[in-house]
Image: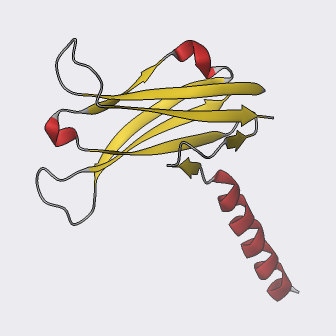
């Protein structure tokens, strides 16, 4: 009887780990669909060795979304000065719609952004 419990346990563990994975989006043209209480991340190409960084703007447009963190990782196998991916994590704290607007800014104040991206999210 114990042999039949092991496959069931492994299946349950696999299902639980799939539920904890965070959805990742890198295409601003794709509408993000999330459920309240879940997190998702935005993956944006970046090269922080140049001083450029993605900055969140227009927090009023986030609606039910709340920033939950960000990080940067150089692309594997790349040398010094190589680009990477900046990841922004958001948590859906209620239902509704929100827009995440990020600008890619150079170092220094008063400099115009090099790029702007907007992700639309629907939380239901």
Q: Position of residue 70 (x, y in %)?
A: 41, 35
Question: At x 10% / y 53%, what residue is drawn?
Answer: 80
User: Dividing the image into 4 quarters, which one contains the N terminus?
Assistant: bottom right
Asked whether 109 or 36 is in front, the reply is 109
User: Dividing the image into 4 quarters, which one contains the C terminus?
Assistant: top right
How many numbered marks, from 0 up?
A: 0
Residue 94: tell me if it is visible: no
Taking 19 as reference, is 52 above or below it?
above
Residue 119 is drawn in which quadrant?
A: top right
Asked whether 52 or 16 is in front, the reply is 52
Q: Position of residue 42 (x, y in %)?
A: 50, 42
Residue 5 vs residue 106: left or right? right
Q: Position of residue 73 (x, y in %)?
A: 30, 49
Question: At x 63% / y 34%, what residue is drawn?
Answer: 120
Taking 121 as reference, is 59 above or below it?
above
Residue 11: tell me if it is visible: yes
Residue 75 is drawn in which quadrant?
A: bottom left
Residue 103 is drawn in which quadrant?
A: top left
Residue 43 vs residue 36: left or right? left
Q: Position of residue 122 (x, y in %)?
A: 73, 34
């Amino acid at each position: 009887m114990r042999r039949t419990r092991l496959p069931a346990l492994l299946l349950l563990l696999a299902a639980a780990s799939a539920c904890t994975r965070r959805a990742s989006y890198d295409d601003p043209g794709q509408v993000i669909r999330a459920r309240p209480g879940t997190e998702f991340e935005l993956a944006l190409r970046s090269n922080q060795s140049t001083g450029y960084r993605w900055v969140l703007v227009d927090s009023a447009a986030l609606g039910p979304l709340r920033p939950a963190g960000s990080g940067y990782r150089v692309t594997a196998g790349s040398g010094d000065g190589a680009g990477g991916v900046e990841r922004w994590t958001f948590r859906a704290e209620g239902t509704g719609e929100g827009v995440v607007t990020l600008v890619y800014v150079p170092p220094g104040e008063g400099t115009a952004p090099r790029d702007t991206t907007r992700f639309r999210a629907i939380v239901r």
